[in-house]
Image (cartoon, rainbow, N blue to C red):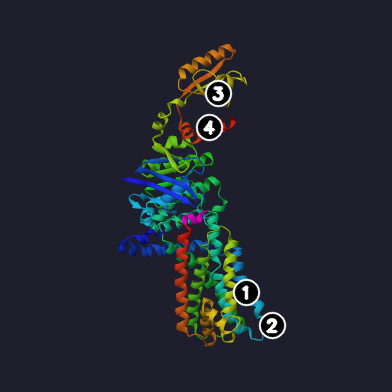
Amino acid sequence: MNGGLHVTDAGFFIRRIPLELAAAWAIARKDMRTYYLKPNIIMSGLLFPLFMFLAFAVGRNAPPGTLIPGLIAITILFSASSIEPVSIPIERRVKTFDRLLSAPITFHTLVFGESLSGFLYSLGIAMLPLGVGIVFYQTRILHAVTLGAGLVLSAFCFATLGTLFAAYPTENVGEVMSLLNLVRLPLIFVSGVFIPLETMPVAGQWVALCSPLTYANDMIRFSYDGTTHFGLLHDIVFLGLFILLFQFVANRLYKKFNE
Amino acid sequence: MFAVEAHDLVKEFGSLRALHKVSFSVREGETFGFLGPNGAGKTTTIRILTGITRATSGTATIFSYDIKDETLRARQSMGIVPETSNVYDDLTAWQNMIFTAELYHVGRAEREATTKELLEIFGLYGRRDEKVHGFSKGMKRRLTLAMGLVNSPRLLFLDEPTSGLDVQSNLIIRDVIANLVHGGVTVFLTTHNIEEANVMCDRVAIINRGEIAAIDSPEKLKKTIQSVQSVEVAFDRSAPESLEDLRTLASVNDARKEGDKIRLYTEDPAAVIEGVTSYAHRHSLKIISITTHGPSLEDVFIRLTGLTVNNERRSARD
């Protein structure tokens, strides 16, 4: 599919960039129209993180408002990474995915476009806990710009993670979701969402460094209470690196499984 | 210029060799039929030519663009209509068309004008704003074909375009394909409907077990098996023993019952007509109709792909 990348004519590739971006946006819009209101996506992207959060938050002594940053972080994780693991296996089954594979677009465009729909979905969903915090608990946002940047970076990072897992060549949504949950569920325990990083054992802190949720949570928490474990620049750089890594691996996997 | 050139295409899935050194070329403006039984390698060949699958070895070009190294350029000039009507059920007909046009980088004004025109041609414009999940099989098929044309392709891959369709959809699709061909579009057609290939194609390739068994125009292919001429006869009453009796007539190679008629395969139709006339006279049968037929493309197909199976059955019986 990305045969265009082999073309030696650099001008050809540069001229294609706006075309590829437009195609990626078309893919994202198609997903929005088709999948955003599917019950299984609402379940896994919105209700699942909410109940997961309530299970851990209820009974704790912390004021509800202080739990909002953690709720936002895991909502973004689950909502951003839930669209593609549902949509792509379905599209494989009904053969519409072949339409994307046979179009004159690169695998980069396919991965970017698919990630874009998860990204936008999770940004919308994240407004719910954010709004609940403001309206019901009067939580104050100290650094709105940082919050915005944190939401954007983490949403795109987790959307790409979902696209990466959806590369697994199956027509069964459950298979992709099972694999994805093997990664997502442990992430919320090792990333400082429920257990502060400072109180985790040393081994746990090392594991936390490998989780993009750690940096997402750190940025979002900073936006609310002004404290950061790693520093903002560190968080931004690592989230950026995770995005690049996930995009690269997803691109390779789609290429490998579809040739 | 060739629209499609395939050289020694080999495709292996593990230890299974699906294609074995498949080579052919399709001239620009030609309607090329690709026939073969299920599992012969038709779809694998199309998937390689459209860049969805990579060949294990061999090369393929589309309008001189290598499908492996210049995939995007090659794809820009092609339209693909797969066997399955792969439309988005949750989108409207209009949205399906526009989305496909966007994937093929068709400009906004052009895609809206082309979409309107194609939906009108395929009789779907009145239902353009309805979600596709309410469409009939024929309507989805027509929409799939319209989506394959939205980028005004120079080469159209059609995989079983009219399979299992109602008469109206069939007529519309065949009419559109005829117009495309008239307009110079190259059509690469796979079909199980051999008569469809016979009527529509300039040349056909017959693929069997991953190898090309024959490539030529339908009429030339028929001439290669003149031994498969036939005499079709209908009597005023059916006698169960007639089929076996007629099979034993001189010059008859095979006999088959086809409805209320019996078809006798021969290299010498005149001798068979004489034999049938005598047989009818001896058994007091009245001949209602008797017709001679040259070999059909279906006969060629059976000869090249199916006789092995029959022989194996006969061998097993023997």
The answer to whether marks 3 and 2 mark residues whose Cβ atoms lie closer than 8 Å is: no
Q: Where are the magenta residues, as a range?
A: A95-100
Give residue A75's quadrant in the image: bottom right
Q: Residues at marks 3 and 2, common chain?
A: no
Residue B148 visible here: no
Give the CA distance from mark 2 to mark 1: 15 Å
Location of residue A13 in the rendering, given as x and y in whole percent from the top left corner: 34, 63
Please determine whether, in this image, residue A259 is positioned above or below residue B211: below
Tally of marks: 4
Amino acid marked by disc 1: Leu
> Of discs 1 and 4, which sits in the foreground?
4
Amino acid marked by disc 4: Asn
Label 4 sits on residue: B311
Residue at 49% from the left image edge and 18% from the top image edge: B272
Label 2 sits on residue: A59
Q: Is residue B312 magenta?
A: no
Instruction: Give the structural element (helix, strand or loop) at label 3.
Output: strand
